Amino acid sequence: MHLKKVLTLRTIVATSAGLTLATSTFVAAIQVAGFLAGNAAWLAILTSGLLCFLAAACFSELNGQLPSAAGIRLYFGRAFNDNLALVISLFYMAVIMGIVGAESFILARVLSYAMPAIPPLVWIIVMFIIAAWVNIRGVKIAGNFQDIITYGLMLSIILLAVLAFGKINFRPENLTVVGGPGNLIQAVALGVFLFVGFEWVTPLAEESTDTKLISKGMLIAVGLISIVYALFTVAVTSTVPKDALGHSVIPHLLFAENLLGKTGVIWMTIICLGASITTFNAGLLSVSRFLYASAREHVLPTCLSKVSLKYFTPWAAILTIFFVGLAISIIVLITKRYLIFVNLAAAMESLIYALAGLAVIKLRQKIPAAQRSYTIPGGLILPGLTVVVFAVLLAAVLITDKIAGLCLAAGLFLSWVYVINGVPVLKERYRKRHPARRRRPVKVELEEQ
Amino acid sequence: MAEHSEITASLRAFQEGYNKNKRLKKMNADWDRVVLVEANDIPSGHTLILRKGELTIQEGSPESPDVKIISDSETLADMFYGDITPTRPYLNGTLKVLGTEDDVVRLDFISLMIWGE
């Protein structure tokens, strides 16, 4: 009995890579380069990618054992406890909203640079209205369209890099000058942001007959993305002076303009739009579904489980995200502190990857006989290494950006307070409104005399 | 552990609730799907067929379903009677729903509309 619709490896790779490709990641890639003395950003990016392989292996084992769209909520719930899983999941969703806010701000600046007559605020509002409308209508990015966008974007970026290398008669100089191990660790820590979301492809396990395809797809996607970002960053830092890049919200646009003039600006704007479509959509979609499921479970207010009777979409959750996301974007627009969200996301992602490694270890101890379609080879070495490596990277991000560290601590604390104090109140309220009911007839078993 | 007949009865209750809801039938008029409901602790398989908004139930498993719902017999019986929501067993891994995300979400919406919160 096979499912009628199944996903191909090509689409799984495109979805995983597409989720990580965003306008904000281009900016983050240049920030990675800013930490290093020479032109060695590629080294930091490839190292981050290599470390993300560890995380991908952990997610593959977790997904192979517990294939579900519930993702970390289920993995961490089974490995640790439900409260911790809920604390992490709730705050992670908030961080994704922050990423959406930063993403819309940077994209708005890109569009305003290409079309100066329209101010960024207008672009932000237009983008949120379109995203909310598309989500309420239940319009989905089809698999083939996702393939075209992602592979087109990657080819496009590689082509731009090759053009840049040709134009400046590129010579491999300063390619390994990092300026000290501390700089490299900080660069690698921020480099993790470039891969944020590659594991969001695990929910597709329910649309695939072979969970091994998801694992393979994630690994290929991380590898491809590492190469694309490494080439892109070296091309940008070799073409445009570092000083000009460091202070800009749109360094990738400056690079394209420097390379091809007006054509470059149009080309890069199209790339940014393509990169943002998938990230923006995936962010809104996953957060709205999470809010809906949490409301159905009575851990968030029940009003968030309201469903459109016409489109079968959780409109209340989508509208909530619309207003929260818009507010975050406007705050970013006013304060220009988008890097806090980038660093916060890098820190949160490192925390989740470290916990994923720990979850693999705990689940192996708790349920040693469980069926696993994939097991990380080498016993506990690689999951243990994942925990240590990402704990160090988490510390590196927090040392680099203390405000992001404070936000992370405050966010996790508030989430914990809510789970401990708010959730029981909601559950009790539900119990009072809906007294225990049982429609299923009680089975009467007669004992033999 | 529930018996096969209890799962059948729960599916009948679900079907009755569905067929009473004219709005739901109208909303699903263009959503033709074959759903497998399978217990993983007893030999029990049922097929839910949605055609032009009408829901029918058959004993046994279909050749190529659009969606697979797999869980232990107790959870299946409780869930289709509406005594528990699908969310809790889904989030704790007891319930597996295999299919496209749209189909999975729609099944949850149908359950919500039949049995309420």
Image (cartoon, coloured by chain):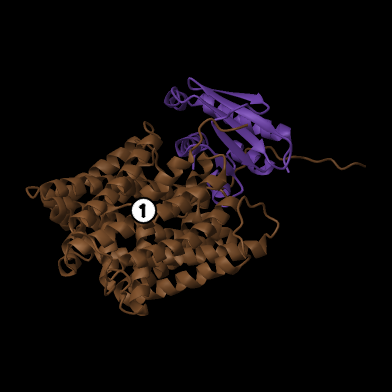
Chain colours: A brown, B purple
Give the camera-side residue of A303 and A173.
A173
Q: Amino acid at mark 1?
A: Thr
Quadrant for the C terminus of chain A in the image: top right
Give the camera-side residue of B116 and B31.
B31
Give how far across and how far down residue A138 sits, in percent: 36, 36
Give how far across and how far down residue B77 sits, in percent: 65, 38
Asked whether, in this view, residue A229 is left or right of residue A335, the answer is right
Asked whether, in this view, residue A23 is left or right of residue A256, the answer is right
Give how far across and how far down residue A357 sits, in percent: 53, 65
| Residue A105 visible in the shown view | no
Chain bearing mark 1: A
Residue at the image point whose x is 52% and y is 25% from the top: B20
How many badges with numbers are in the image? 1
Residue at the extreme top of the image, as rendered: B52
Give how far across and how far down residue A169 sits, in percent: 20, 59
| Residue B36 visible in the shown view | yes
The quarter of the picture where residue A184 lies is bottom left
Quadrant for the N terminus of chain A in the image: top right
The quarter of the picture where residue B57 lies is top right
Q: Secondary structure at mark 1?
A: helix
Q: Is residue A51 above or below residue A445?
A: below
Asked whether, in this view, residue A189 is left or right of residue B7, the answer is left
Q: Mark 1 sits on what residue?
A: A20
Give the camera-side residue of A390 and A258.
A258
Give the camera-side residue of A408 and A198.
A198
Q: Is residue B58 above or below residue A197?
A: above
